[in-house]
């Protein structure tokens, strides 16, 4: 937990203005990282306000914009023109810079991969080498090291991404109820060939023969002829700007096994009875409809623990992880299970396998559970997502991410004095060269 009051500079309009800045610093976008990635106790947290659109090719869908623009803002401008970001996470309130820093992934990772696959190039300002153009043909090593690099290599200035052409803003969906974990894994494989997008929810409190029971949600972007006549009047409908705000933090005593059971029953019903035609906002970003939703976890807060394991022993490892969770006194609330395709390089999280993300309210017993899960995931050859991590230690991190030294060599070339740092880099020993 960070006790030191954070210093903050706001209104960063040009990164060159901080090249001679002596204090350690880290750039913060919209603050959607779950851990300590975008904060710095003994230094400055810089607010990125650069969000202009620089160029757009209406024929190809190639967009160049400043790194502080959000996915939500991109959708708002281009949805009515029939263009959409091809890879999005579970919230649209994330900047392009943040998307690169975490190498975000979505419900079609097994097909589309991570955010790196839709970025053609970006410009970065670095303490040692100034402004660099990074792409697959220019500064290639830096290009790949930035994806998942936690914003530690330099200040990303502009980003050029490829948007996806769409006919409607709706998804044709299907919900498949499964009775246990084995059925869940088999269902992913069975429906892969028919649906591009897939994500599953399971009952985290289920045990025994019902362990892993849940709902697999599937979808494809609807073509114009696949939506009803009423929706055809506005086939590229934008998401609503209205949202319900939680006015206060829920009391901590409200987070218990009973409330967890009630919430999971509601989720199970809503997932199993989803409409066959769903707007992208509900399909991709259901939590965005609730402002300040994190207040639902009380003043103690929560973590989201996300890991990925390779394919060879997925049933055995997922079963053991689910048993650890369901038998603990740490009541989980929301969870997401997805299938992943091939990963990228350096500190990028994904690998071919299954990924599970699950929310835990902070409690005294939680660190012990997380350590057990870390050991299990490490033994399976998997790893924890750094963009959401809050507990991982240096030694376990280095085993999970064996390319960390190669990444650190890139960091050393660009920032030898360690001007760019965050609490994650300290905890994981990413600046050990200093």
Image (cartoon, rainbow, N blue to C red):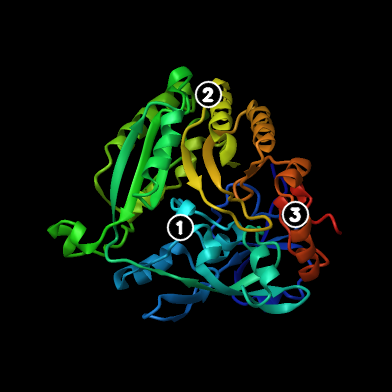
Splitting the image into 4 quarters, where does residue 98 fall? bottom right
In the figure, 380 relative to 35: above or below?
A: above
Chain-order first, disc 1 or disc 3? 1
Residue sitting farthest toward the right: 434
Q: Quick one: label 1, few (<14), some, or many (20+) residues within 10 Å?
A: many
Q: Secondary structure at mark 3?
A: helix
Query: Is the Cβ of the residue at disc 1 closer than 8 Å to that at disc 3?
Result: no
Q: CA distance from mark 3 to mark 2?
A: 33 Å
In the figure, 165 relative to 188: above or below?
A: below
- Residue depicted at 62% across the width and 70% down the height: 156
Q: Quick one: label 3, few (<14), some, or many (20+) residues within 10 Å?
A: many
- Residue depicted at 44% across the width and 50% down the height: 107
Residue 41 appearing in the image? no
Residue 400 appearing in the image? yes
The residue tagged 1 is: 88
The residue tagged 3 is: 404
Q: Quick one: label 2, few (<14), some, or many (20+) residues within 10 Å?
A: some
In the rendered view, does 102 fall on the left or right side of 85? Answer: right
- Residue depicted at 36% across the width and 28% down the height: 265
The residue tagged 2 is: 326
Label 1 vs label 3, nearer the camera:
3
Residue 99: x and y in percent read 55, 61
Q: CA distance from mark 1 to mark 3?
A: 26 Å
Foreground residue among 361 and 60:
60
Q: Secondary structure at mark 2?
A: helix
Which image quadrant: the C terminus?
Answer: bottom right
Splitting the image into 4 quarters, where does residue 62 fall? bottom left
Residue 24: x and y in percent read 76, 62
């Amino acid at each position: 937990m960070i006790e030191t009051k954070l210093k903050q500079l706001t209104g960063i309009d040009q990164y060159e203005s901080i090249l001679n800045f002596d204090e350690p610093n880290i750039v913060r976008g919209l603050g959607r990282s779950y851990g300590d990635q975008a904060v710095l106790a003994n230094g400055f947290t810089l607010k990125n306000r650069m969000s202009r659109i620089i160029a757009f090719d209406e024929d190809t869908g190639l967009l160049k914009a400043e790194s502080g623009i959000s996915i939500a803002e991109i959708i708002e401008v281009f949805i009515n023109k029939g263009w959409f970001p091809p890879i999005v996470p579970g919230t649209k309130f994330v900047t392009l810079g943040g998307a690169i820093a975490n190498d975000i992934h979505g419900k079609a990772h097994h097909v589309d991969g991570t955010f790196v696959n839709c970025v053609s190039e970006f410009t970065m300002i670095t303490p040692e080498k100034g402004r660099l153009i990074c792409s697959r043909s220019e500064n290639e090593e830096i290009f790949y090291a930035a994806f998942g690099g936690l914003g530690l290599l330099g200040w990303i200035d502009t980003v050029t991404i490829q948007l996806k052409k769409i006919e409607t803003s709706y998804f044709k969906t299907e919900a498949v109820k499964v009775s246990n974990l084995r059925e869940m894994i088999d269902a992913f494989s069975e429906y892969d060939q028919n649906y591009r997008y897939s994500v599953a929810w399971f009952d985290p409190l289920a045990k025994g023969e019902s362990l892993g029971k849940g709902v697999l949600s599937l979808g494809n972007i609807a073509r114009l002829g696949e939506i009803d006549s009423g929706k055809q009047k506005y086939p590229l409908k934008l998401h609503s700007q209205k949202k319900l705000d939680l006015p206060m933090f829920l009391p901590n005593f409200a987070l218990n096994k009973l409330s967890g059971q009630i919430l999971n029953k509601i989720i199970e019903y809503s997932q199993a009875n989803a409409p066959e035609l769903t707007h992208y906002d509900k399909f991709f970003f259901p939590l965005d409809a609730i402002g300040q939703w994190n207040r639902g976890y009380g003043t103690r807060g929560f973590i989201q623990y996300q890991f990925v394991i390779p394919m060879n022993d997925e049933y055995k490892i997922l079963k053991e992880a689910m048993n650890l969770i369901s038998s603990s006194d740490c009541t989980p609330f929301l969870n997401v299970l997805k299938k992943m395709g091939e990963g990228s390089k350096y500190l990028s999280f994904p690998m071919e396998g299954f990924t599970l993300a699950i929310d835990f309210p902070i409690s005294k017993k939680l660190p012990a559970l997380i350590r057990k899960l870390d050991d299990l995931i490490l033994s399976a050859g998997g790893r924890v997502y750094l963009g959401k991590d809050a507990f991982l230690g240096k030694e376990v991190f280095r085993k999970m991410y064996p390319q960390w030294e190669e990444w650190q060599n890139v960091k050393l070339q660009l920032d030898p004095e360690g001007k760019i740092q965050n609490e994650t880099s300290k905890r994981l020993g990413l600046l050990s060269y200093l």
